[in-house]
């Protein structure tokens, strides 16, 4: 709060009186930059402490736009051209989801489905931006992704990168935005489902033993210190940070082992499924168990403009198996309560099946699944109308979803981070915590 009797906090800086005040500050021994910094410090927001419910996040992103009707929000009483060809199955909580997900139907007590997600962006890129940042796209500023913000706020744990992407950084909006590039995601660079899977750059080069590695690191450290001190460029300091974290990872056997799926019991690998969905989800579990804070993985291509029934039947079984086992596995290990699992897509699909037996882009209403990390299991939040055209109750925006995720991680979503030009930008602008899905 500003003290009314303090002449340095009255009036703005950009009028005549403001400049006179700045001059007065100089007379008191404060330079103009000092004065501006002190004023900014006086106006900083105060943030209340939020106790974290979740220690880690597994973000399963389904690129292309998964149809809500053929997954979490079927419409069995609508005409065929709206409901589609697939049927429904009852969950273990008595709700109904699409019969494409029979294994997940048996795990419904562990997760919450939001059936009223909504935004206005029907283009893939813009919808993806919304669902990775909580912000509408802006030509003036690139916003940081969830992973970059979590990395910025918490940093590495157990010498594992805070933010990891499986198999690669999924899109340009999964990056650091206006934050320094040192908070970017560590990409595996290969698919864990491949028989020859190996994380790139995770082993010493041939002929380089531990002693030689230490000598090289010492020399490089000296070079880097001189080089970094000579320039303040973000990419230079970020590269130095990357090297330091890479050394920490190479020098920590337990951290390196987290990336090695061969250490996993063969029966567990079979249980998840020896396919892309299963291997990527199993890898995500290993990484959060070892200390990663946010793991983003992608699976499939859900942009089904034609023959959606065949598309769902081709891709959904592996997702159904891998995700249901992930929830079971986390629960059996005592990790589900502290690991938030989020399944999202950039938007949903049109209410009516098109002339090519597919569905087109539809951002007005779609579904997201959340589990663990402080989320109530067995809950359906919000509803779409009878044809899945728009929200019928309790609409949820990307900002609301992001704010809720950050809240569960103990991060204040309206905290201001500093963008280039000393511009304070809120992590999320205007989002609300979805209170009734929190346990």
Image: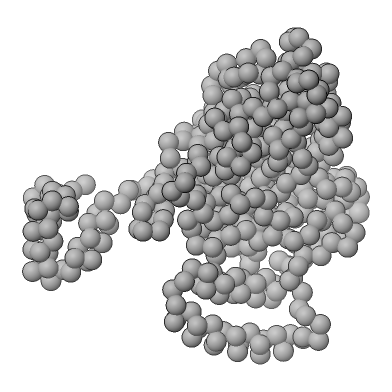
Does residue 374 appear anywhere in the picture? no
Residue 374 percent across, percent down from the top left: 59, 38
The answer to whether residue 69 is above or below residue 268 is above
Residue 64 percent across, percent down from the top left: 71, 38
Residue 379 placement: quadrant: top right
Residue 296 percent across, percent down from the top left: 67, 50
The residue depicted at 12 percent of the width and 58 percent of the height is: 19
The answer to whether residue 88 is above or below residue 131 is above
The residue depicted at 48 percent of the width and 86 percent of the height is: 226
Render colour scheme: one colour
Residue 354 percent across, percent down from the top left: 75, 21
The answer to whether residue 224 is above or below residue 69 is below
Q: Is residue 284 left or right of residue 292?
A: right
The residue depicted at 61 percent of the width and 52 percent of the height is: 172
Q: Is residue 246 left or right of residue 282?
A: left
Q: Quadrant of the C terminus?
A: top right
Does residue 190 appear anywhere in the picture? yes
Q: How many numbered marks appear?
A: 0
The residue depicted at 64 percent of the width and 32 percent of the height is: 347
Depth order, front residue of 358/239: 358
The answer to whether residue 253 is above or below residue 58 is below
Depth order, front residue of 76/97: 76
Q: Is residue 255 left or right of residue 221?
A: right
């Amino acid at each position: 709060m500003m003290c009314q009797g303090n002449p340095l906090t009255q009036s703005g800086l950009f009028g005549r009186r403001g400049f006179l005040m700045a001059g007065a500050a100089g007379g008191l021994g404060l330079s103009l930059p000092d004065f501006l910094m002190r004023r900014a410090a006086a106006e900083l927001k105060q943030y209340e402490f939020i106790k974290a419910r979740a220690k880690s996040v597994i973000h399963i992103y389904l690129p292309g736009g998964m149809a809500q009707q053929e997954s979490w929000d079927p419409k069995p009483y609508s005409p065929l051209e709206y409901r589609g060809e697939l049927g429904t199955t009852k969950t273990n909580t008595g709700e109904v989801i699409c019969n494409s997900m029979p294994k997940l139907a048996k795990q419904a007590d562990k997760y919450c489905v939001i059936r009223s997600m909504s935004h206005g962006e029907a283009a893939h890129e813009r919808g993806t931006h919304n669902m990775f940042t909580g912000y509408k796209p802006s030509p003036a500023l690139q916003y940081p992704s969830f992973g970059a913000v979590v990395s910025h706020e918490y940093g590495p744990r157990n010498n594992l990168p805070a933010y990891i992407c499986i198999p690669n950084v999924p899109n340009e909006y999964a990056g650091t935005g206006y934050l320094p590039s040192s908070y970017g995601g560590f990409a595996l660079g290969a698919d864990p489902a491949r028989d020859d899977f190996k994380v790139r750059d995770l082993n010493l080069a041939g002929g380089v033993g531990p002693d030689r590695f230490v000598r090289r690191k010492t020399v490089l450290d000296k070079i880097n210190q001189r080089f970094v001190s000579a320039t303040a460029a973000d990419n230079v300091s970020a590269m130095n940070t990357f090297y330091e974290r890479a050394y920490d990872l190479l020098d920590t056997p337990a951290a390196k082992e987290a990336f090695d799926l061969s250490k996993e019991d063969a029966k567990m690998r079979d249980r998840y499924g020896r396919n892309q969905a299963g291997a990527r989800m199993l890898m995500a579990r290993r990484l959060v168990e070892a200390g990663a804070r946010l793991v983003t993985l992608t699976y499939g291509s859900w942009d089904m403009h034609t023959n959606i029934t065949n598309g769902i039947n081709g891709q959904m079984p592996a997702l159904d198996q891998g995700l249901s086992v992930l929830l079971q596995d986390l629960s059996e290990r005592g990790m589900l309560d502290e690991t938030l699992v989020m399944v999202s897509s950039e938007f949903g699909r049109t209410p009516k099946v098109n002339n090519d037996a597919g569905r087109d882009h539809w951002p007005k209403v779609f579904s997201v699944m959340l589990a663990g990390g402080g989320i109530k299991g067995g809950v359906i939040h919000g509803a779409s109308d009878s044809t899945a055209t728009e929200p019928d109750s309790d609409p949820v925006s990307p900002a609301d979803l992001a704010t809720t995720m950050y809240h569960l991680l103990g991060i204040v979503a309206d905290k201001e981070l500093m963008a280039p030009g000393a511009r304070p930008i809120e992590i999320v602008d205007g989002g609300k915590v979805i209170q009734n899905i929190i346990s």
